[in-house]
Amino acid sequence: MKHWWWKIAAVVLLIVASVAGLYVPLAPALVRFTNGGDQFCPQRVEVVDATHLKVFVEVPEGLREAMTDLSVGYLRYAGAFYSKGGGEGFPAMDCGDEAPAPASGAFVFPNRSILYESIRNLHFHVPMWFTMIALMGLSVWHSIKALGGTNVLEHDRTALAAVDVGLWFCGLGLLTGALWARATWGTFWTSDVKLNGAAVTALIYLAYLVLRGSITDAHKRARLAGIYNIFAFTLLVLFLFVVPRLNAIDSLHPGNGGNSGFNDLDLDNRLRIIFYPAVMGWVLLGLWMAQLRTRTARLAEQLDR
Amino acid sequence: MRSTEILTLLRLEAALDLRQRAAWGGMLLYVVSAVYVAYLAIKSVQGAALWNALYWIILLFAAFNALARSFQREEGGRQLYLYTLVHPRSVVLARTAYNAFTMVVLALLSLLFHSLFLGTQALESAAWGPFLLAVVLGAIGLATVLTLIAAIAARAGNGLGTMAILGFPLVLPMLLAVMRASKLSLDGVAWSVTSTYFGGLVLLNVITITLAWTLFPYLWRD
């Protein structure tokens, strides 16, 4: 139990996060209506179904005849991303705050008109990249240990296993991302800094595998692959986290370039409490897979001998 | 690792290169041919974006071609001989410095041919200082990244193919940053805007050299 409790944790977290991630209701954050100059704060908002809301507004006495014009809804960070309150029949609306950017024109429900339910991909797509980075980091750690000189082949085996599994997560991340992009942006692939980063990552680690394949001597392979791994990972981190900021290129991704996303203000806590367990679950699963991969590789080598 | 060692190694590199002038001739001819092919394919280049892209792509390939041979000389006994004489870090620093010098010369000559064949229209509104700085920093950057890659590829025992596979994804950060910096300079954007890119380029170079300096001793011993 002492050694494998985290595997149980991985399974539990993944089941919880996947089920909750698919079933948690998404809700809008309706802030206020306007009728020309007058603003009304919605007293109560109920979700009817995926495209209908029931909004209860208290209209002052003299304005009731103007009800027919009451058409524009201001949504704060319209979408599955919303700030405070929300959900089915959220009672107390915080109408005191200024709504930063009113959603243009017509009332949008339930989500930012391009995200809709696809926001649930947050629980599946994003953890893939967290897991991949974690596995590549693990791989580099073992490469450093391998260069350190003790247990060279053992560390090298783990480094390879982590890259192997990490590449699978990279593939899944690309797949979930491409499907989401097709639904949201209208295309499977587009020129975006994060997509370039993903492509470069895949290229780097495929090159790592090619490099390994071209060397027959095990110790030499461990050393050269380790050096390349450390060099590549460092440049990759620079590429993923520094160059985009340097170039000030905005990504199309939520949370970048003015798109709502992973910030205090616009990611709902209800998504957040699923997202973090999902990340933990996937990372643990990745580590588990890497561990199994190391073990099978070790056994295969012992059988060869 | 001593500075005298590095100087001696640099002198050795220069002497060997002077002895094999054909290698330099080959590099130049490679660039000229590539530029000429681009010229035949496109005739006249309109706009700085394409001009800039072509320049860096050609320089990228020239860099692979030029630097692939930088560790091919150390076959068999010579490497062991060098190993007993000098610290590996001297070797990598000297080699990086010499390759950087080679690439800067190559980049400037390539710029000359590029303007000659593909026209100087793109250069008309350029901010010359930043543009040349971008060219120099980009050339140094390509050299620093590819020196260690060339060393790994040479140790792995196969030549240009492995180097290209290993190197392409790794030069991308450098290449994207430098292409952007040089494009902005070609458009004549003020230094106050572009200076962050140059800071980034210098940072990338420093990090790459530090990595090469740290990792090379492990590569060198057998």
Image: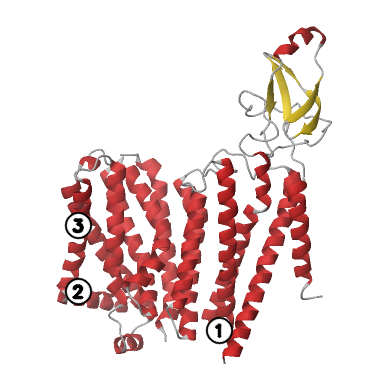
Circle 1 — which element?
helix
Outermost bottom residue? A305
**Mark 3 surroundings within 10 Å by alpha-carbon count, few (fewer than 14), some (14 through 19), many (20 or more):** some
**Residue A155 point in image, percent of width and height:** 58, 80
Tag 1: amino acid:
Leu
Instruction: Say left or right for A301 vs B131.
Output: right
Q: CA distance from mark 3 to mark 2?
A: 17 Å
Q: Are marks 3 and 2 in contact (CB under 8 Å)?
A: no
Tag 2: amino acid:
Asp
Viewer-nearest residue: A238 or A305: A305
| Sooner in the amino-acid sequence: mark 3 or mark 2 | 2
Residue at position x 55%, y 71% in the image: A140
Q: Nearer the viewer, mark 1 or mark 3?
A: 1
Pick the quarter of the image with the C terminus of chain A: bottom right
Residue at position x 80%, y 15% in the image: A59
Instruction: Say left or right for B58 vs B148.
Output: left
Q: CA distance from mark 2 to mark 1?
A: 39 Å
**Mark 2 surroundings within 10 Å by alpha-carbon count, few (fewer than 14), some (14 through 19), many (20 or more):** few
Residue identified by numbered label 1: A153
Label annotation for residue B109: 3
Pointer 3 indicates a residue of which chain? B
